[in-house]
Image (cartoon, coloured by chain):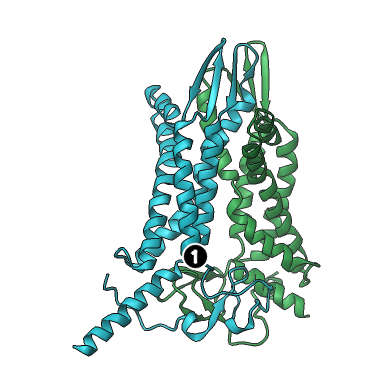
């Protein structure tokens, strides 16, 4: 919590903004980036409220994504519907542990970790939960990096639906869970993009300023 | 050859001093030129600020041209062929998207098409369009616009995820039917490696500095 803020020049204090598109540094008063023309901003706009809104939407969609079947298999006239967790259990009981582990990490662990870590990041930037800006910066980096890999289950459904069209013997069709799960992945990716890790350091600076005020008044 | 490479090293735009701001902690740094093959980390949080990739333009152009050629192969040859009794089905990238669209989940189908076909095409095509002319010190018309869109589409490029999906489905199907790897599968694996190499070959900052220098000539 009481991480020492190094006395380094920070862009916001100097009125300098780094362009998010082309990385050019320009005074914020210019308005638009002199190099690529995109809008300049010190912090992403409404970062925390946007991130929270998207994370809540993703968490809401996470329920149908796991409850509804992502695909239905019709084998010799018998229809079985399979959710993400059932698919995972199938691999595990068939003895394909590495694949079961990959599916578990990509489809269950990463979405949950993403949703909780983004909530934690928003809380930390507001000063609600204790944090170390440096460590959470790394958490944010990993969150952004890993997000895409959850999509693997959707691709598996796409491939199975394409290939398993064997007439009466066996056909696979996509289920409504696939749409919900794709929604979770896309929403969490947008949520991670709209979060601004600089806010973590802003909060740290505010805390340090408050500490100084308290020690002065004592 | 040595002389030519030195001409191609990272130029600095006019004016200055040039600054770099850390994306994570907002610390302002002086953006000094660095030798090829080295990187600069933020003094405050340790994140990478920028790096000077060796022979960046040559590598990015050649890898993305290769990626474009491989895309033609990927889309025209079968990925995987499955034989189950007398029935035979083949997997292609557009086929996978089309199957989802026609089987009642069009949104997911379009998503798959965007993430595995459109974004790699925008990335590879954009890199060739922007970096090819830059090799000769020119900037193509609309190069800045294209580069803006490339950085927007980059996070949505999911070909390596699709490849993992192929491997998972193979293990699922291997017990049901006989599978044959087509040329498309190997081309797709190479495409994934080429795209990764092309994107990693040039730092965003260097690309934009080069565009700025070429544009003001």
Task: Measuring from the top left, give residue A153's x and y in whole percent.
Answer: 52, 36
Residue tagged 1: A47
Q: Nearer the viewer, residue A84 or B31?
A: A84
Task: Measuring from the top left, give residue A155's x and y in whole percent.
Answer: 57, 36
Report which quarter residue A41 is drawn in. bottom right
Residue drawn at (67%, 50%) of the image: B119
User: Which color is chain A depicted in?
Assistant: cyan
Quarter of the image where the N terminus of chain A is located: bottom left
Task: Report the label total.
Answer: 1
B19 lies left or right of B110: left
A104 lies left or right of B189: left
Report which quarter residue A103 is drawn in. top left
Subunit bearing disc 1: A
A129 lies left or right of B6: left
Report which quarter residue A62 is drawn in. top left
Task: Measuring from the top left, give residue A110's x and y in whole percent.
Answer: 42, 45
> Mark 1 falls on what kind of element?
helix
Residue drawn at (38%, 30%) of the image: A97
Q: Is residue B96 above or below residue A76?
A: below
User: Which color is chain B depicted in?
Assistant: green
Residue drawn at (54%, 35%) of the image: A178
Q: Is residue A209 above or below residue A58?
A: below
Q: Is residue B5 above or below residue A189?
A: below
């Amino acid at each position: 919590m009481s991480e020492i803020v190094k006395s380094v020049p920070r862009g916001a204090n100097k009125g300098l903004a780094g362009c998010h598109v082309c990385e050019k540094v320009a005074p914020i008063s210019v308005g638009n980036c002199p190099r690529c023309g995109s809008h300049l901003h010190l912090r992403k706009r409404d970062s925390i409220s946007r991130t929270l809104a998207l994370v809540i939407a993703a968490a809401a969609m996470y329920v149908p994504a796991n409850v509804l079947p992502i695909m239905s298999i019709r084998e010799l006239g018998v229809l079985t519907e399979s959710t993400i967790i059932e698919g995972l259990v199938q691999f595990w009981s068939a003895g394909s542990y590495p694949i079961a582990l990959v599916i578990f990490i990509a489809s269950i662990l990463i979405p949950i970790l993403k949703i909780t870590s983004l909530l934690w990041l928003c809380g930390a930037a507001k000063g609600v939960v204790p944090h170390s800006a440096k460590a959470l910066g790394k958490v944010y980096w990993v969150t952004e990096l890993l997000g895409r890999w959850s999509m693997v289950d959707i691709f598996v459904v796409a491939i199975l639906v394409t290939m398993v069209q064997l007439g009466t013997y066996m056909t696979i069709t996509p289920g409504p869970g696939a749409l919900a799960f794709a929604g979770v992945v896309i929403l969490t990716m947008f949520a991670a993009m709209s979060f601004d890790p600089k806010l973590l350091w802003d909060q740290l600076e505010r805390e340090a300023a408050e500490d100084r005020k308290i020690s002065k008044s004592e | 050859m040595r002389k030519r490479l030195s001409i191609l090293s990272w130029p600095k735009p006019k004016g200055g001093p040039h600054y770099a701001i850390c994306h994570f902690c907002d610390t302002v740094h002086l953006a000094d030129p660095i030798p090829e093959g080295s990187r600069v980390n933020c003094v405050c949080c340790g994140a990478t600020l920028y790096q000077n990739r060796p022979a960046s333009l040559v590598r990015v152009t050649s890898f993305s041209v290769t990626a474009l050629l491989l895309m033609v192969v990927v889309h025209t040859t079968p990925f995987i062929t499955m034989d189950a009794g007398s029935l035979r089905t083949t997997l292609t990238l557009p086929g996978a998207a089309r199957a989802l669209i026609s089987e009642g989940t069009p949104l997911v189908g379009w998503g798959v098409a965007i993430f595995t076909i459109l974004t790699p095409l925008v990335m590879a095509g954009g890199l060739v369009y922007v970096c090819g002319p830059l090799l000769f010190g020119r900037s193509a018309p609309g190069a800045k616009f294209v580069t803006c869109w490339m950085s927007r589409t980059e996070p949505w490029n999911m070909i390596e995820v699709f490849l993992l999906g192929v491997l998972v489905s193979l293990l699922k199907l291997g017990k049901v039917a006989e599978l044959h790897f087509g040329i498309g599968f190997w081309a797709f694996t190479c495409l994934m490696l080429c795209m990764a190499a092309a994107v990693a070959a040039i730092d965003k900052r260097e690309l934009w500095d080069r565009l700025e220098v070429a544009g003001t000539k």
